[in-house]
Amino acid sequence: MARNTGNFSSKIAFYTKAIAKVSMANRDEIFAPVAMVEKFSDFAEAVDLSNHTKYGLQAGVFTQNLANAQHASGNLEYVGVIINDVPTFRVDNMPYGSLKDSGFGREGVKYPMEEMSEIRLVVVSS
């Protein structure tokens, strides 16, 4: 039985192949506990299906196969690819930010330093 307290719900939605590849659940960002269950013939197809979205913040890939992890990191169209952890993993000093329609700009130590700095050129001739 699900419990609701304020803005929290313990309900989890599971979508199966009954939803088309172009469904809202596959192409839009969903800020809720939703698990997408898709059938695929091989890992490359799963990566390709994951790229059919207008967003690209972070992706989580669970695998024990190093070749699959390398394929995911090289082919997923996301700013961050987290292997064997959820895509919300983050530490403050790692680059983080948007790709496609996910937010705007980048975060992480480097980016605010650049944004708050004025780059100057000084030439000293003798």
Image (tube, rainbow, N blue to C red):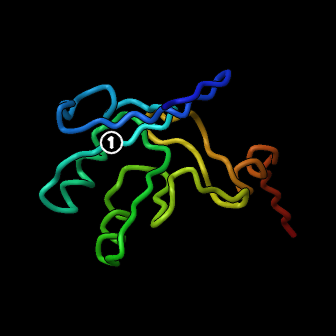
Residue 124 lies, in percent from the top left, at: 85, 64
The amino acid sitting under disc 1 is Met
Q: In the rendered picture of this protein, how many numbered marks are placed on residues?
A: 1
Closer to the camera in the image, 60 or 48: 60
Residue 109 lies, in percent from the top left, at: 74, 56
What residue is rendered at 64% in x and 56% in y?
Answer: 90
Indicate left or right for 56 with 106 as reference: left
Q: Residues within 10 Å of mark 1 (few under 14, many from 20)?
A: few
* Vertical comparison of 97 with 53: above or below: below
Residue 28 lies, in percent from the top left, at: 38, 30
Indicate left or right for 85 with 120 as reference: left
Label 1 SS: strand
Closer to the camera in the image, 34 or 93: 34
* Outermost front residue: 1
Residue 71 lies, in percent from the top left, at: 30, 67
Indicate left or right for 88 with 79 as reference: right
* Outermost top residue: 6
* Vertical comparison of 42 with 58: above or below: below
What residue is rendered at 62% in x and 28% in y?
Answer: 8
Indicate left or right for 14 with 79 as reference: left
What residue is rendered at 67% in x and 21% in y?
Answer: 6
* Outermost left residue: 41
Q: On the image, numbered disc 1 is attached to which residue?
A: 36
Quadrant the C terminus occupies: bottom right
What residue is rendered at 29% in x and 35% in y?
Answer: 15
Closer to the camera in the image, 89 or 105: 89
Q: Quadrant of residue 100?
A: top left
